[in-house]
Amino acid sequence: MKEFHGRVIAGGNWCGEAVVSHAGVNTLATFQKSALHNDDHVIVSDQNNSDIYGLNITGKALCLPITIGSTTGGLVIQTVCSMKINPSAFLFSEHIDSLAASGIVLARIWEDSDVIAIDNLGEEFLNTVKTGGKVEIKEDGTVIVY
């Protein structure tokens, strides 16, 4: 068990399974196919991200350094949150980018989503957490990796 402390962007308490990407996550490529097909879960469709390609990330903690891609990133996150097929949490090792932050904040306000976002967890966080492993998130930005 190891504890990490980050900055709360959208807080909450949660415990569940982690899915880990060591590369930046392209939100459009990751979520677009599931959103367009009105699926009831997200299977990552970004073939350029071998860490998470083909994995179900709905209801999981998506652990990542940062999101990358076009200016549609925030809208894509808000959309999957409105569809209730989003990851339960976005746990960033780096500083959250403005597009991801906007999508998460708008999802919380406009979609009444309970999506959680914590940033600045550090590189050691991404080196510790493993796909399929258990993480616990506290309201104060503490993330415990089991």
Image (cartoon, rainbow, N blue to C red):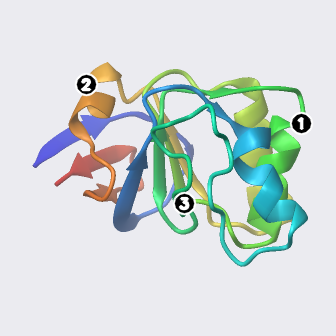
Q: Nearer the viewer, residue 35 or 88?
A: 35
- Label 3: which secondary element: loop
- Label 1: which secondary element: loop
- At x 50%, y 26%, the residue is 23
Q: Is residue 107 left or right of residue 46?
A: right
Q: Is residue 126 visible?
A: yes
Residue density around tag 2, few if under 14, some if 14–19, many if 20 or more, within 10 Å: few
Q: Is residue 105 visible?
A: no
In this view, which residue lies farthest toward the front? Answer: 47
Identity of the amino acid at label 3? Ile
- At x 27%, y 42%, the residue is 129
Q: Please determine whether, in this image, residue 145 is positioned above or below residue 83.
A: above
What residue did someone put label 3 on? 57
Mark with earlier residue (2, 3) = 3
In this view, which residue lies farthest toward the bottom? Answer: 40
Q: Is residue 28 left or right of residue 12?
A: right
What residue did someone put label 1 on? 72
Residue density around tag 3, few if under 14, some if 14–19, many if 20 or more, within 10 Å: many
Identity of the amino acid at label 2? Glu
Q: Position of residue 74 (x, y in %)?
A: 82, 40
What residue did someone put label 2 on? 124
Task: State the CA–CA distance, disc 2 to disc 3.
Answer: 22 Å
Mark with earlier residue (3, 1) = 3
- At x 64%, y 39%, the residue is 47
Residue density around tag 1, few if under 14, some if 14–19, many if 20 or more, within 10 Å: few
